[in-house]
Image (cartoon, rainbow, N blue to C red):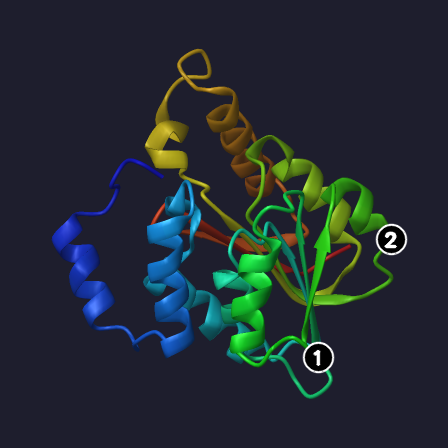
Amino acid sequence: MSKQLIDAAIEAYATDHTSPESPVLARLNHETNRKVMQPVMLSGHLQGAVLQLFSHLVKPSRVLEIGTFTGYSAICLAQGLVEGGKLYTIDIEEELLDFSSGYIREAGLEGKIIQLTGDATEIIPKLDESFDLVFIDADKTNYSRYFDMVFSKVRMGGIILADNVLYEGDVLLTPDEQSKNARAIAEFNEKVNQDARIEHVLLTIRDGLMVMRKVGE
């Protein structure tokens, strides 16, 4: 995310009036921005707090995250897990596995967060679980496909979250003006808007967060 959609002063004010990051998350945030390419992919303090709040509200037994990056959002989403709960997080890249797993261990969540490496479209069908909470934050061209793949695995009343649904504001451009990713996100948003099986709201947090609740099959 290179464009600032929300006024920087308002964003800073919102962050200042949000519960602080845990020490582990603060270090992970700092190290990601210092050492990892495209650190903007990190959920960060404000959005991370939103993810953590959703987790505490849902009290999930099973969570699925598509797109691990450095593990920040996984740590946030794991905070509300009930006793014996598990979070599966999938990423196609192996290069950040040691980095993310180190912070997951430091957060004391190595027994709760299961890291899976590979193509999510191949891994998701093999997961024999019913999920209470799903977070989609991976390659944008596959958002609609991920949604379709996970929907039957989400319990009735379960929550699906999708990140970057404003795509730097490019969803407002005409299809001819949009990049491949922006067009895919715009199409995903329209797909969600037409789906009577879910209640949904698009939150203008950071680069846009779509919140969906499953209400039908």
> Closer to the camera, 211 or 217?
211
* Residue at image mark 2: 126
Q: Secondary structure at mark 2?
A: helix
Asked if residue 74 shows in the view, the reply is: yes
Residue 128 x/y as whole percent: 87, 62
Of callouts 1 and 2, the N-terminal one:
1
Relative horizontal placement of residue 51, taking residue 169 as reference (left or right): right
Relative horizontal placement of residue 102, taking residue 53 as reference (left or right): right
Q: Amino acid at mark 2?
A: Lys
Residue 18 x/y as whole percent: 27, 73
Q: Amino acid at mark 1?
A: Gly
| Disc marking residue 104 | none
* Residue sticking out furthest to the bottom: 83
Give residue 77's quadrant in the image.
bottom right
> Closer to the camera, 111 or 163?
111
* Residue at image mark 1: 85
Give residue 161's quadrant in the image.
bottom right
